[in-house]
Amino acid sequence: MALIEGFRIKNYRVLRDVTLGRLRTGQNQPEALTPLVAVIGKNGTGKSTLFDAFGFLADALRVGVEEACDLKQRGGFDRLVSAGTSEPVEFELYYRESGEARPISYELKIGKEKKGRPYVLSERLSGTRPRAKRGRLYDYLRVENGTGSAWRGEQPGVNEQDRVEVNLADPRHLGIATFGALKEHPPIVRFREFLSGWYLSYFTPDAARSLPMAGPQKHLNVHGDNLGNVVQFMEREHPERFKAILDRIAAKIPGIDKIDTSKTDDGRLLLRFNDKGFKDPFFAQQMSDGTLKLFAYLLLLEDPEPPPFVCIEEPENGLYHRLLDTLAEEFRKHATGRRGAAQVFVTTHQPYFVDALRPEETWILDKESDGFSGIRRASDDRIVKAMVQESLPLGGLWYSEYLDKK
């Protein structure tokens, strides 16, 4: 299971310079990010911006940095970069491909040309040498202003003939997008697959109520409008796993007995919810937002080939408050590998959800005096940690302002 241990963002809107987790190994380094990570904070502190920073990295790989900046929710580079700075937007990601693997670091800087177009100022993918001095890195890929080098094989720097010069034709596209498609560069290939496999949920119940064309599909898409297609696939290919989902839903939503699909005469797909008290089923168009959302999340967590990283913004919206601790525990079970194998990152403003979290899983965004945001881990506050150990719920402490910055 791949695990992000640290993530740094600089000059990205309200996030002038924030770091979650650690970015290097060695003594006196912060603790790595946990498999389940939750970010809380007041309105306007940057929770949605932090969520979008992950999305920006995934979009930059998919379509390039200029188009990623120009997507509707971002509005271009000038609206993306922190106010009052001419410095580049920067990202640094530190992760391991598995628990025993050596850490890998990815750094990306995005600047602006004189004509105003954003481009890749520099990009670096690097790893640590086995038995090397602490912190010493070697590069799989290093590019500045479109030129640099990449190394073939698993151990860069061993033979000079394995070094490949890089001269990118388009400075707005990532080097990992190009070299990650070539089998001669396996570490870059694996990183590209890891980043391209991220799942950022933009699920909306209205999308899940749409009528897609019939046909099984393996994975839930980011909006959830193929929910019925995934049900078709699970019914056909993984009936036991699908039954387990239904059993858990039945335990959480009274009355739900069976969920299946039916096909209309014009080839559309209807998602049906059968209630024990009624002869005829209810269709997705009649179900509550909360029921559809909970079902979609549980279905996502039961994906037979789970994404390596799942990012969900405010999963509590539309859910009954007594279901929130259960949902948090479902996320944790999935993230810790007992069910599936994917790190889960969520943002939330619901104290009932936070009640189910642990201090080391919880990060707090604050507005600083300069108008930008800072971030800290709840477990860094010894008083808060001690109160949670005495069985005081973390969400209750947050609601009572014990987690506010002193």
Image (spheres, rainbow, N blue to C red):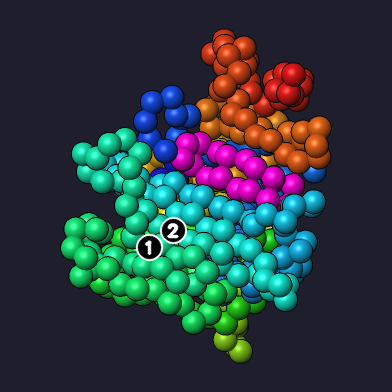
Q: Is residue 192 visible?
A: no
Which of the pair 266/158 is nearer the observer? Answer: 158
Name the residue at the bottom extreme. 266
Q: Which residues are magenta?
A: 6-23
Q: Is residue 369 left or right of residue 187?
A: right
| Residue lying at 74% horizontally and 47% vertically, measured from the top left | 14
Residue 156, image x and y in percent?
A: 25, 59
Pointer 2 or 1: first along the chain: 2
Callout 1: SS: strand
Q: In which image quadrant can residue 392 be found?
A: top right
Residue 268, image x and y in percent?
A: 60, 82
Name the residue at the left extreme. 159
| Residue lying at 38% horizontally and 63% vertically, measured from the top left | 141
* Residue occupied by mark 1: 141
| Residue lying at 57% horizontally and 82% vertically, measured from the top left | 213
Do callouts 2 and 1 mark residues in contact (Cβ within 8 Å)? yes
Quadrant, the C terminus: top right
Residue 359 badge: none
Residue 89, image x and y in percent?
A: 64, 56
Magenta stretch prevailing secondary structure:
strand
* Residue occupied by mark 2: 124
Callout 2: SS: strand
| Residue lying at 41% horizontally and 50% vertically, measured from the top left | 105
Question: In the rendered image of this protein, does residue 270 appear above or below residue 14?
Answer: below
Callout 2, which amino acid?
Arg
Mark 2–mark 1 distance (CA, rounded to whole Å): 6 Å
Callout 1, which amino acid?
Leu
Which of the pair 345/133 is nearer the observer? Answer: 133
Q: Is residue 157 left or right of residue 254?
A: left
Q: In which image quadrant can residue 376 be found?
A: top right
Question: In the rendered image of this protein, does residue 211 appear above or below residue 3?
Answer: below
